[in-house]
Amino acid sequence: MTRASLRLRLALAGAVAICLSLALAGWGLTLLFSAHVERRAVGELETHLDQVLGALEPGPGGALTLGNQPADPRFRQPYGGLYWQIDTPGGTLRSRSLWDWQLSLPALSPTDGLAVLDDLRTPDGRRLLGVERSVVLSPSLGGDPVTILLAMDRTALSEATRDFAEDLLAYLGLLAVALIAAGWLQLRIGLRPLGELARRLSAIRTGDAERLGGNLPSEVRPLASDFDALLAAREAEMQAARRRAGDLAHGLKTPLQALLGESQRLRQAGHAQTAESIEQIVGSMRQHVDRELTRARVATRAGGACSDVTAVVAQVIDVIVRTPAGARVDWDTSMAGPGGPGPTDDLPMQAALDPADLAEALGTLLENAARYARRCVAVDARINKTGAIEIDVRDDGPGLPESALTRLLDRGARLDERGGNTGLGLAICREIAEGAGGRLMLGNAHPGLRARLTLPAARQARGRI
Amino acid sequence: MSNATPALLLVGLLATTATHADDDHTRARQALERGEVLPLTEILARVREQYPGHVLETEFDAEDDGYRYELELLDEDGYVLEIELDAATGEILEVEREDD
């Protein structure tokens, strides 16, 4: 799941980090608050201690008593939460809040100062926070050492801490949501250039662009320029391979021609049978060389190839009318744009393949049509509903039996009924069409045969982005 | 001088009542130490079982037949109750509550 999206992965890691940090912050803040509350409580108890100590006065019969009771009502209410107790040599004085309890105070000496008692407990086990101090009274009060304790219930303190923690939790939750949202936003904005990179890559794939180009964030710029360098190297390799294929074709064609010449001489010398078989072998070799050359060319076709259908059709017809078969028939061409019939000079039909490939494919189709037509060959090119280019080549000849139609397009199949190298020519034509992302269909049009070449339109035809 | 006497008496009386109220916890402590009464925590626990609420005022009195706790309690319905208990047994003797 996390492998699917870098953004999700980063967002999840960010969310976990935010939650952990906030949990840690919440825990720390609660601890700090608890310590703070306790310090405040100890300060309050110290004030009460001074007040109680100052209120000590001699009572009836020489015993000490508390003149002014501290004002806080919690000292008066039994178990009220705030307590004082004074241990004197003559007995113990207690706040009313202690009621029937008496606390046992740890022994202190007057020089010890103020002691904070953390583990003080009431007789029924409640925890108290206390401050204790031992003092020597003035002579007018008897000059005795006494111990004074001021204590409060811890319940109130822990309740305050718990309330704080609950309030804090709500706030931290809100903060976590806000931070996670901000992190997500940050990721979206931060990773947007990667989307741009993907868009440019896709443009390269569809042939709208040739390079990723610059104007990218510095982090991805080295990647983009390396990628562009790779594209350039691949392109150079492809061109070299194509050149080598062309060289190979020329290199083989001349020896094959020479071999045919040799077979002619054999025939003249009376070895007709030998000459026949050599010619057959040469023919077969030539077919395979042609086919491999086409295959190499189609395979190395660059993504951005583009050819003007109208121009290529005119050019191919121009060549074919000079052949005996082509000169014998009428040529009827109709080039329509996307809007309907009629020539559209302002919007040329651009097919996404190399002009040389298109010329070869069309050459095969038109040559066949010219060969089997009685009087007329119609070439009709248009842009269909899906935006692809359809080129129909139709003759008014005898057509083909249905069973032969599919067989005709098999790779390298030969169709003796139509003679010559037609089968292989159509197979090459089909390979060119499919290599460009289109297809070739054959069908009887009564009369004659109709070959339909469907090709994807080049993107450039709709304006370069 | 003769005028001052009732005033002094009154002051003395007030002081006595004050000390009386002030040292009821001392008497409670002494009675507990003698084993004559239950701890107040236990008394409160018993009251809370039947009358949840919080205690406003606690009084400790000696009657002829023993000690009494008199509690003023604000219950959860917002009524102020007066509850009298036997301090030795924790038995609730009387509950006064305005009827609705």
Image (spheres, coloured by chain):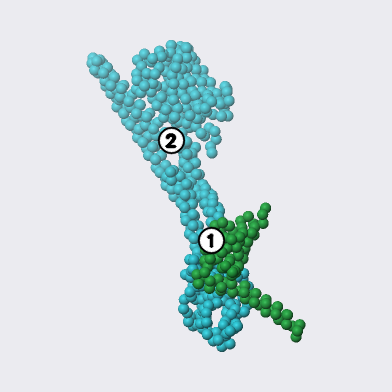
Q: Does residue B86 appear in the picture of this structure?
A: yes
The one of A76 and A421 positioned closer to us in this rendering: A76
x and y percentages locating residue B90 in the rendered image: 54, 62
Q: Which of A367 and A216 lies nearest the eye of the viewer?
A: A216
Residue at horizontal 42 percent and vertical 33 percent from the top: A301
Name the residue at 24% across, 17% down.
Answer: A274
Q: Which mark is residue B45?
A: 1
Q: Let me know if residue A218 appears in the view.
A: no
How far is the residue under mark 1 from the one under mark 2?
93 Å
- Which label sits on residue A68? none
Amino acid bearing label 2: Ala
Residue type (three-letter) at the residue carrying disc 1:
Ala
In the picture, one chain is cyan; tell me its letter.
A
Identify the element where label 2 is drawn: loop
State which chain disc 2 sits on.
A
Quarter of the image holding residue A415?
Answer: top left
Q: Is residue A38 above or below residue A374?
A: below
Q: Image height check: is A51 above or below A303?
A: below
Q: Which residue is mark 2?
A: A302
Q: Which chain is green?
A: B
Q: Which SS class for mark 1?
A: helix
Chain letter of the residue carrying label 1:
B
